[in-house]
Amino acid sequence: MSITQLSRKNIQALVPYQSARRLGGKGDVWLNANEYPISPDFSLTCQNFNRYPEAQPQAVIQGYANYAGVSAENVIVSRGGDECIELIIRAFCEPNQDAILYCPPTYGMYSVSAETCGIACKKVPLTADFQLNLGEIERQLANVKVVFVCSPNNPTGNLVKREDLIALLEMTRNRAIVVVDEAYIEFCPTASLVKELVNYPHLAIIRTLSKAFALAGLRCGFTLANPELIGILQKVIAPYPLPTPIADIAAQALSAQGLAMMQQRVKTVIANRDWLVEELNKCAIIEKVYPSEANYLLFKAKNGQQLFQYLWDNGIILRNQGSQLMLENCIRITVGTEEENQRTMQAINQFAQQGN
Ligand SMILES: *Cc1c(COP(=O)(O)O)cnc(C)c1O
């Protein structure tokens, strides 16, 4: 038997997550991973690396709870929001029996994590305006243990209507966990469902330091939920998920000064996003710029595939969404620095002038 044949069947069949890094590219304008374009500056304050870290570092948990407006018992910290996704699936879904449900086009990790765990995926596409198809979700709910909804949705950028999320929570009560992925909520904080935690014991909210906090390299994410649900995740998480240096920097990022810098970043990103929307809308080959509440924009271009390739060849790396459901000829661009945005627009306009 080959090593591959020894591996689990679902792993043999698995197509790993096509992360921006994995897709590669050669360039100096990287607007493909929804990162913040400039690194914040931190120094380690703690040097005792001989000891294991705290399992759930108190300063980080309390810092995030204060920021999110919940209690420490409502928070678990993990290696990025991505680990939260997998923890929830591992804790709630019985292999070869239960399913998760998600609504494409959306974030790719829900299906990758489920497939890794041997959990079936039910897909209920978003409507044409990228909202939930609640009727179809209800019809598909048999043996679904976890429903994932991303709001603002990646890659479309829009919010899912609050009344639909509430209707989904009512529909799934005592039946399934609803995960609302709020990775980009800092760009539209009033849309958070965090205040609904008191009403819904089956609600879990995913957060991250990778986007507005500009710390994608740190690998630090959070789940917000009621204590019973958090306690279940505590049982399955690794004993020491957060290395000491990560906890140190995360706590600093959540200080009053860290939060103020994050809010400043959000303002800058939104101003630069507005500029990009305006410029893209002036360009004849751009057929549609979708409204965004996040730090990226989805747009539809005439010959989207060729445009993506042209930019790629010129060292401007965006994220091609053309193969996703309903997103033919669509490209996602992360809002970069003013200079990066200008260079990208210049290149798009050059491509347009070549008669495309
Ligand atoms: C970036 C992102 C996450 C989490 O990313 P981490 O870097 O693992 O924290 C989760 N959901 C969505 C939709 C994202 O875009």
Image (cartoon, rainbow, N blue to C red):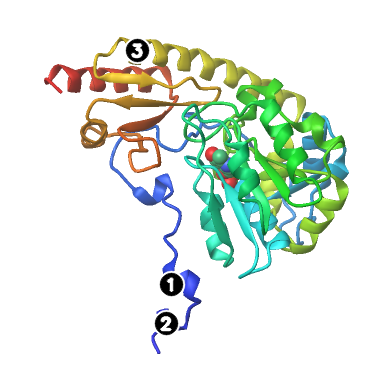
Mark seen at residue 317: none
Q: Quadrant for ligand 1?
A: top right
Amino acid type assigned to the residue bearing label 2 in the image: Gln
- The image shows residue 66 at horizontal and vertical percentages of 82, 31
Question: Which mark is on residue 281?
Answer: 3
Q: Which residue is mark 2?
A: 5
The amino acid type of the residue labelled 1 equals: Gln
The quadrant in which the N terminus is found is bottom left
Extreme bottom residue here? 1
SS at mark 2?
A: helix
| The residue carrying mark 3 has its beta carbon less than 8 Å from ligand 1 | no
As drawn, 275 above or below 56: above
| Label whose residue precedes the other's in the sequence (1 or 2) | 2
Q: Residue at x 71, y 20 (%)?
A: 190
Residue 148, given in percent of the width and then of the height, sits at 62, 45
- Locate residue 220: give its quadrant: top right
Circles 1, 2 touching at the beta carbon (< 8 Å) = yes
Q: Which residue is mark 1?
A: 12
| 314 shown above or below 277 | below
Between discs 2 and 3, the one toward the N terminus: 2
* Amino acid marked by disc 3: Asn
